[in-house]
Image: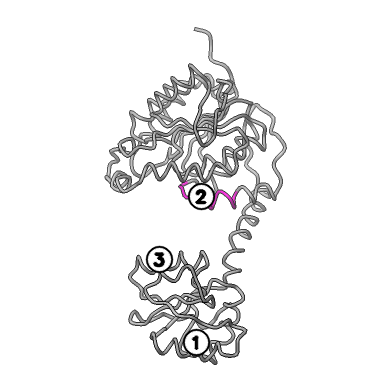
Amino acid sequence: MNTSQKAIPPSQAILIFPSCMPRALEYLQKCQRENINVIGSSSLTHDVSRDKYPDWFYLPYITDAAFPDALRQAIATFDIGGIYCPNPVAWDFLNLALGEIAPHVSLVNEAPTDVELSRYHLAQATARSWISGPLFLASELPAKASISHMELASLFRHADQIPGMCDHEKVFALCEVARHSVAGDIVEIGSWWGKSAFVLARLALCYDIGKLLCVDPWTSENLVQNDESGMVDRLSAQMDADGALAIFEMNLLPYNQKHINYLRMPSTDAARRYRDTHCAATNTFGRTEYCGGIAILHIDGNHAYDAVKADVESWAEHVVAGGWVIFDDYVWPYGDGPQRIGDDFLMQQQDRIGTAFVMGTALFVQLARPPRAS
């Protein structure tokens, strides 16, 4: 671990070396957003990244005896106060040698390998924690055997790479819901970048539930929720809907085993399409046939009261006995649409409810019995 890190005076520059690695380019973008003066450098005579940097210079390889003097000269020329180094071997060398080469200069990042591996270690620790303390559901359906520690750790690790608001508590609850699920389609209303969609798609395979259908219009106008503070709508106005769909496709496509697709349309229109055709077709995922009975319905679209109500009225009738309805953001600081509709659903369907619980911010409801004959 580097112990020489210190604050870099704003007047001094940060050297990014080597400059062409993906983490280097990410750090360059961060510095540019924050108006931090940066200098790029590498040991390649023809570095393809050099044009991305405002200033750039060549350094010998760290194995070259000329490297220390070349670095000292660059530090003096460009008034460098810190070095960002994403290469683990070069970082380790600089961590040991900077005290002699340039005592007043420090590394600004932790050991790259430690940073990368820490995410995997966290996923394994999270999986171990929840396997040792499972969530027991009062479900009439017998639980399927749990996925292994490694499968669970993999689920957490890959989910964490996708942006979104699906926290670990909800992921764990979804894992338990999947263990107590009947077979059928999984339908998600509101997918955006695909974080919870990935979790549901993976669980669909692990527990042999069915195929995933994601429903989202991916349009700016459908993001307007009229939240009480206006904070959500203000942020939503800055979102790129087309870009979000592209990110969704990139996140889900590598995990598709002909069991994922989406309908880019409002929820009520998608419900009619689902009812009439039981299929979805897109250029990215091809054509997917669905059975027409929903095992897990995840409602996470527009949180305005009328929008949530329309989602429930359009989709809940397709949930089969033993199926689940999940109201995301049942606990939501920006409005009470999901909670009001969730409470109405509990009241109206009380003769059908087998179990219900809140975990994190979501309400999970299982319909254990078929509806009564009218």
Does dot 1 land on a helix, a strand or a loop?
helix
Q: Is residue 289 left or right of residue 342?
A: right
Residue 161 sits inside the magenta stretch: yes
Q: Amino acid at mark 1?
A: Leu
Name the residue rendered at 62%, 63% in the picture: 117
Above or below, 91 against 314 in this view is below
- For disc 3, the marked residue is 30
Q: Amino acid at mark 3?
A: Lys
Mark nearer the N terminus (1 vs 2): 1
Q: Position of residue 70 (x, y in %)?
A: 50, 88
Residue 19 sits inside the magenta stretch: no
Label at residue 108: none
- Please state which of residues 55 and 92 is positioned toward the viewer in this rendering: 55
Q: Position of residue 335 (x, y in %)?
A: 33, 39
Query: Label 1: few (<14), some or many (≥20) within 10 Å?
Result: some
Query: Label 3: few (<14), some or many (≥20) within 10 Å?
Result: few
- For disc 1, the marked residue is 71
